[in-house]
Amino acid sequence: MMTEGPGVRGKLRRIKEKGWLGGVCAGFGYWLGIPAWLVRLIWTVLVLVYGIGAILYILLWIFMPAWDAVPEGYEERAGG
């Protein structure tokens, strides 16, 4: 569980329940405190321009731990 307070980040984890594929972008959005749609947009551009984003996404999907449930405060922090 994340420690309370502004600017405090917990460990980076996937959020399976909020993800389109593996929840990687939703997890990044929550961790960074930005909307998940923005992370997805940036990730898509990186995949289309550089191509390496797809491989990185798959590796993160495999190795990044997942939250057991949607973390408290997800909608305020990364929803949208």
Image: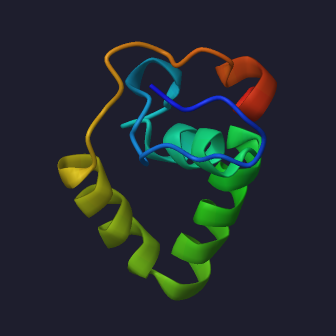
Q: Position of residue 48 (x, y in %)?
A: 58, 75
Position of residue 29 in the picture relative to residue 47 (left or right): right
Q: Between residues 52 and 79, which one lies in front from this camera angle?
A: 79
Q: Between residues 48 and 30, which one lies in front from this camera angle?
A: 30
Quarter of the image with the C terminus is: top right
Q: Between residues 69 and 17, which one lies in front from this camera angle?
A: 69
Dividing the picture into quadrants, the one containing residue 67 is: top left
Position of residue 62 in the picture relative to residue 55 (left or right): left
Q: Between residues 3 and 66, which one lies in front from this camera angle?
A: 3
Position of residue 26 in the picture relative to residue 68 (left or right): right
Q: Position of residue 75 (x, y in %)?
A: 73, 19
Quarter of the image with the N terminus is: top left
User: Which residue is at a point 67% across and 53% down the rendered structure image?
Assistant: 39
Q: How is the image coloured?
A: rainbow
Position of residue 13 in the picture relative to residue 3 (left or right): left
Q: Position of residue 42 (x, y in %)?
A: 69, 64
Question: Is residue 79 among what the camera can see?
Answer: yes
